[in-house]
Amino acid sequence: MDMILFISLLSILLFLLIIFHIRALCHRRNLPPGPRGLPIFGNLFDIGPRPHESLANLAKVHGPLMTIKQGNVTSVVVSSPEMARQVLQKQDEAFSGRVVPNAITELEHSSHAVAWLPIGEEWRLIRRVLGSCLINSKTLDMLRGIRQDVVQEMVHHVREVCTKGGTVGINRTAFTTIMNMMSRTCFSANVDEYELGNENGFRNAVTSIMKLTAKFDIADYFPCVKCMDPQRARQNAKAAYGCLEQLCDHFIDQRQKQRNSGLTRHGDILDALLDFSLENQSDFYLKHIQVLLVELFLAGTDTSTITTEWALAELISHPQMMLKLRDEICETVRKEGTIEETEILRLPYLQAVVKETMRLHLAVPFLVPHKTEKDVKINDYILPKNTQVLVNAWAIARDSNTWDKPACFMPERFLQNEIEFKGQHFSFLPFGSGRRMCPGMPLAHRVVSLMIASLVYHFEWKLPNGSTEPVDMSETFSLTLQKAKPLVAVPKMARP
C-alpha cells in the first residue's frame, strides 16, 4: 500500500513538473534568447558549481540579455554595462522587486529586512533610519575613532604573532576585526576574539547563516515542492537566524535596562535606534531594531573580509605593488605612527588597489536577484511580471570591451580613469546601483581601506616556510566568491 501511495505521489509530482515546463515554454516566446535546456531541469546542469563563469560564457553565445531556465524558474541574465544600465537605472522601479529564498520565507526577519522588503513605506523608513543612524558622512566621521581603535587591536595581535614567529590566517583575522568593528559601533563591546574559537558567539551564528544561504535548495527552482520543504531549509534557517537574533536581543534588553536605570548613554548605533523607535513607536519598533542589527552583521562582515583577504593575496603576489603602496601610506602617517582614516581615503594608489581588488575578485558576483514588478519591455523583448533578473556583475567587471587585460591585477588602471563604485559607472558594480544599491557601501569602503592600509604599513608579509611558489589564487563560489585556500602568511614588523 505504501508503495502504491509513493508511486501515485511521484506521478502527480512528475505531471505537475511537466505542466510547469509546458507553461514556461509558452511564456518564453517574447523573452530574450538563451540556451536550450533539458525538460523539467532546464539549464541547471549548464550552470554548474561556478555559475558566474558558466553564465558569462553562455552570454558570449546568446547575448548580454539572456534567458535561462533553472528548473521551473525563468530567469533573465544581464551581462553587459548597457543592459545593467537599463535594469538598474532607466527602468529601476520596474525591476525593483525581490525574489525571497524559500529558506527565509517563513521568518519574520524577511518581513522587515531592507534587503527583502518590497519598495514601499516600510522600506523607505528603514533606509531613512540607516541614513540617519549609520551611513551618513557625519555619523561615519563621528564613529571613526572606534574603527581605528579596533584596527589597533588587530595590529597589536599581529605584533604578538611576530614576536612568536607564527603565521596569520588573514581571513580569520580580518573577520574578527570587522566583526568587532560592527559590534563596537552597534553595542560598544567586542563580540569576538583573535585567539579563542568563540564557538557559541557571533562568529558561529554569522558563519552558520552564511553556510545555510550558500546551500542549493531545490525548492527555489521547483516551486511546486516548496510546501514540502524537502531539504528542511526553512527549519534550518529558523534555527540559524534564531541564534543571531537572540544574541542581538540580549544587547537590546541589556541596553533598555541600563537606560531605564538612568545610566550613562553609550552614544552608539543601538542608542540611536532606540531613540528613533521612541520617536516613531507606531512605525519602527524593537523587531525592526533586531532585524536591522542582524542585517548589519550579515552584510558587513563576510564581504569586507573577503575583499581584504584577496587584496593581501594580490599584494603578496606583486611585491613591487606592495612596496609602492607602503611608500604612499608612509608619506601620510603621523609621527606617532597613527593612520588616519580621513587621510587614507584620499590616497590614490591605495584606492586604486581597493577598486581593482573589488573588480577582479568581486565578493558577490551576482547582485541580489531582482524581480520585475510588472511586464517590462527591454529592447525588443517583453519580460513578464515576476521574472527573476540576475545581474552578473562578475562578467561585467571582466568585459574585455570595457577593461584592458581584464583577468590581470592592475591597480594602475584606476589611476588613469575616474570610474567609481558608487553606482554611476555600470561597468563596475560591486555594490549595485539604483534604489536597491547596497546601503552599507560608505562604511564598507572605509573599513576595507583602513584594514588594508594598516596591514601593509605595519608589516611585511611572506608565505610560510619561505615558499617562493605563487599564491594560490583559486576561488570557490558559495553566493560570495572566496579564496578556495585561505591565505596564511608570515608577518614581519615593518614599523615599531
Image (cartoon, helix red, strand yellow):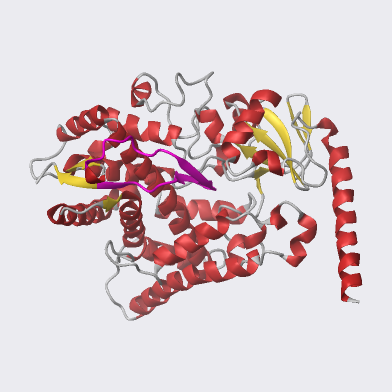
Residue 230 percent across, percent down from the top left: 71, 64
Displayed quadrant of residue 150: bottom left
Q: Closest to the observer: 48 or 245?
A: 48
Give the number of callouts.
0
Q: Is residue 275 visible?
A: no
228 with respect to 77 (left or right): right
Quadrant for the N terminus in the image: bottom right
Which region is colored magenta?
466-489
Residue 124, above or below 286: above
Q: Is residue 202 visible?
A: yes
Displayed quadrant of residue 462: top left
451 with respect to 57 (left or right): left
Asked if the stretch drawn in magenta spans residue 404, the answer is no
User: Which residue corresponds to the image point at 57% horizontal and 37% vertical from the top-left?
Assistant: 52
Residue 442 percent across, percent down from the top left: 39, 43
User: Which residue corresponds to the image point at 54% horizontal and 18% vertical from the top-left?
Assistant: 401
Residue 129 percent across, percent down from the top left: 47, 55
491 with respect to 105 (left or right): left
Q: Closest to the observer: 306 or 104?
A: 306
Residue 412, above or below 276: above
258 with respect to 238 (left or right): left
Asked if the stretch drawn in magenta spans residue 485, the answer is yes
Residue 48, above or below 106: above
